[in-house]
Amino acid sequence: MRVKLKRNILFFLVSFFVFFSSVFALNKAPVDITTMSIDDINDAFTKGYLNSELLVNLYLDRINEYDYLYNSINQINDNALEQARELDNERLEGKIRGPLHGIPILVKTNIDVKGLATTAGAKSLSDNYPNDDAYVIKKLIDSGAIILGSTNMSEFAFSAQNSYSSYGYVKNVFNNNYTSYGSSGGSAVSLGAAFAAASLGTDTNSSVRIPAAGAGVVGYRPTLGLISRSGVIPYDIERDTVGIMSKNISDNALLLSIISGEDKKDVYTTNFESYDYNDFEINNDMSDYTIGVVTQFINGTGKGITGVTNSDILNLTNSSIDNMKNAGANIVYIDEFYLQKNYSIATSTYAGLTMCDNINEYLKGTTGTMRSFQQIAKSGGHVQRLTGYAKGCNGHYKSKSYRDSLKSKYRTHVDNVFNKYNVDVIVFPAIKNKPYSYKSTGLISPGSYLSSVIGYPSITVPMGKDELGFSYSIEIVSTYKNDSKLLNIAGSFEKANGNTISSSDLVPSLYSVPDEVLLLKNIYENIDPSLYSDLYEDIHSYFVNYNSNDNYIDDAFNLVDKYNNYEVKTTKNNLNIISNKVSKKILIIILLVVILLLSVFKIVSFYCFSMKKNTQK
């Protein structure tokens, strides 16, 4: 009750704050950006409801108003608005680079973006500026995306329990007394708070999927090697990967199609082609899919990843499985998936000691005070202990072949289970226990010991909320290089489960869209421009200039009234036309009747005359 009371009080204060701050909000739009996917944003671009400059400003307004609650943003790109204007000009000239043209995206602060310090959450790296963009950032920028800024994280990506760095804690998007999880907590929370259209994080053990699950967004870890890691501060190079956070599966697949593919600077990507977005397909009927349910991760006993699942999470998981079944999926229950020896492999194949050598190599592409890992470790500008990792400098760690041999055994076991039960994916709750204080630990997450260890693709998809408003996700795992099938199944589940885009109640829209504007939007989207060309242009101009219009409500009312007058005139004209047509038809019918009567009269007269003549004879 105390937690619920605190949450209600916080919600009241935030709502009170928004009520007054919205009066002075710098920017507004005729659409609610907090519930929009990338497809929705592109549709709004086409209709003139948004342009890139306005969209960037709307997100910046939200960050300025709300991020004090969460501490999710590390840096803002000072050039974002200028880049947005350039992209708007390109759009006006008919030069659209692709579906990310003018779309703002946030990036975890261990990924290189020129002009932003790549800090990995450590103040000792506050002047660590990259000479070039990371490979994935280049791909985004080339496609027209705007890097809005960087996000806070668990320092050096060390912890999935929470996101704690030199820049403080990142707080849970639904209740800022609780953990955001980590290490990509800032990327997840900023997206859950609708500070951008999508975000990038990195996943070593579960660092994209778990914070995404806690923020009510989609979190995807690809097959290791599908996305380049060059230009990313390394932690465990044999597990690290860039991952994607999005508001729905379709957005995730779209970003993957843009940032995936071979990068000569990252040897892990040499056997991969880019993911093709044309392969993405959401099926209403899931009958082609066989879903393996790992019962040990759902109906367990005791503690740990095979222990008891919280009852609310259990109910959401079972409901999600039922929804897949109702959509036609073949559900198979797997009882012997988890083996203790595989847990042992997971925990004994960490390559964190490679961090020293790999960061030293990484720093060759940046400028700043810190020029070696050893220097960073000795500095006071970090909250995590680094001295243990410094022991691995100069190759002082076990060989990669040793770890690979252990992982091979794990992969064989997983593949055998998939083949034995003939399943396309396996599923289980991404997190088995309720959130805890942002200063505490206690995460129970089965996926941390599975796909990240053996390099298989995995995704967490929201499945619902509990009565306190916390979001929980189901985790879906496939086998090596089966990312396309994984995304298709995840998208089909998302639809079967009835998932909709939403943001936290703590961070509602900073502006409202009046009923008059909504009515005008409905008219605009349904009238025929060829019949209402002048009015259509007037309405289009109204929406294009909506943000700078102080009389937007009155003008909307006048345009609606103008449309109604058009309708009245059109109706009268139509009635006159109909009347004229009816009159002409009546005259034609009368004429035909007269002709018919005259013809009949003539025939009858001729007949009578003939009969009379015969009688006289």
Image (cartoon, rainbow, N blue to C red):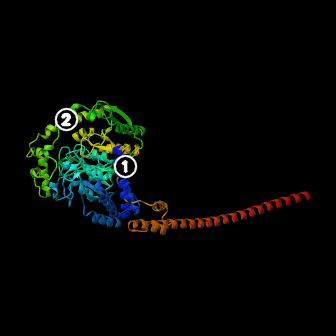
* 317 with respect to 348 (left or right): right
**Tally of numbered discs:** 2
Up-down: is 550 above or below 276?
below
Near-viewer residue (188 or 598): 188
Which residue is denoted by mark 2 in the rendering? 345
Q: Is residue 62 above or below residue 415?
A: below
Whether residue 500 is visible to the viewer of this picture, yes or no, is yes
- Relative to the observer, which residue lies in front, 237 or 417? 237
Tag of residue 8: 1
Residue at position x 58%, y 65% in the image = 571
Secondary structure under tag 2 reads helix
Can residue 103 be seen from the camera position used here? no
Picture coordinates of residue 267 (x, y %)?
A: 18, 48
**Which image quadrant for residue 603?**
bottom right
Residue drawn at the location 86% of the way across and 61% of the way down: 609
Residue at (70% x, 65% y) in the render: 587
Residue type at mark 2: give it.
Answer: Ile
Q: Quadrant of the N terminus?
A: top left
Q: Is residue 315 above or below residue 599?
A: above
Return the x and y of residue 255 as percentages of the image width and height.
Answer: 30, 52
How far separated are the C-alphas under marks 1 and 2? 45 Å
- Residue kind at label 1, given as amino acid type: Asn
Mark 1 lies on a secondary structure that is helix
